[in-house]
Amino acid sequence: MRTTSVGVVRIPTKGPGDVAGLLGMIEQGEIDPKAILAILGKTEGNGGVNDFTREYAVAALCTALAPHVGLEPHRVEQRIAFVMSGGTEGVLSPHITVFTRKSIAQAPAGLADKRLSIGMAQTRDFLPEELGRSAQIEETAKAVVSAMADAGITEPKDVHFVQIKCPLLTSDRVEAASARGNTTVTTSAYSSMAYSRGASALGVAVALGEIEEGIRDQDVLRRFELFSKVASTSAGIELIHNVVIVLGNSASSASPFEIGHAVMHDAIDAAAVIEALASVGLKAGSTANTGRELVNIFAKAEASPNGNVRGFRHTMLEDTDISATRHARAAVGGLIGGLAGSGAVYVSGGAEHQGPPGGGPVAAIVRVADDSD
């Protein structure tokens, strides 16, 4: 098994098309563009079907990176995985997190712990009528297994976060399915985002053995007791397949970073965020020099489907002015930002089958200082 070194850096952005910070780090030699494997970002759009800040951000990044990786801009996505999550409500701050990976001859002496590793895989393109159904679940599960192998992770327990970018339905895609005599899971573009996210999350659960029974089409968005504790899925108009990024710890990694996670049971579950920080040796809000530096936190946010949080009614699901996912991102983003000491955290809305109903996974990445730091 090859030994790899994974790097992670968080870069603030001034807008969806802002690539100055990334290019500056490349020019200064702090990031090797040819080692970039994935970029996860938060953009200041609405997170809905018509949120084109996601596509704009990806286009800007591809154009900026193309000359550095020797590819035409439209081919950069074949080499680098881009996952842009729209919506920076409340104190959430737009930013990108860049992941790099290099093969090295051997691990440094004395490195005993498993360290951060990353793997990537893609599904085949889906037909519109396959979204939100068993085909998407099954293909996603296969891709998760491939991404784990790419990351050098052999045990499901070492997987701490699986980020997936998945497609949604548009009127053109619905019409194309109808023209072939097929029906889609829904004709609503907005509802299709939830179906696609949910099916993708169930694919993660199947791959990691979190669900032992077979999943049927009718289980998606109905049987919410079926979920993954590490899946984070985000739907967008810019693709028609699933991009799968597995983050975990591996003995084959010599990275100076580690990742851990916990599961939030509702939108105000501060204890879970504290647990996630503790899993990587950090205390919430602490500025003490522990030899560990928080890089970023990744989490899902969801409005409780039963209309209340710990017995108290909320109106997120009944507000016609602001969608429930935007409410949830703002609430969870504020909670995590307060405990992490920064609003530049990755909080994605819509947690169908991603953690228990009303909750979601929360993962933390830290940089571990060595003796030379």
Image: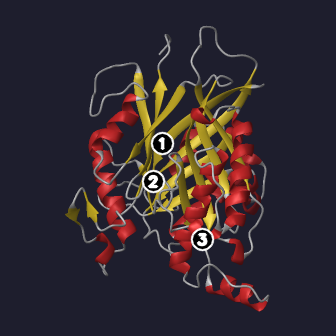
Q: Nearer the viewer, residue 181 or 215?
A: 215
Q: Nearer the viewer, mark 3 or mark 2?
A: 3
Q: Position of residue 151 (x, y in %)?
A: 69, 36
Q: Position of residue 46 (x, y in %)?
A: 42, 70
Q: Is residue 236 visible?
A: no
Q: Nearer the viewer, residue 373 or 317?
A: 317
Q: Is residue 174 above or below residue 76?
A: below
Residue at (65% x, 22% y) in the render: 251
Marks 3 and 2 in Cβ contact (< 8 Å): no
Which type of secondary structure does the marked residue at label 2 adopt? loop
Q: Which mark is residue 65?
A: none
Q: Dot 2 corresponds to which residue?
A: 13
Quadrant of the drawing holding the N terminus: top right
Q: Dot 3 corresponds to which residue?
A: 218
| Color style of the picture | secondary structure
Q: Is residue 318 above or below residue 267?
A: below
Residue at (69% x, 65% y) in the render: 134
Few, some or many C-alpha atoms within 10 Å of disc 3 (few <14, some 14-19, many ≥20)? few
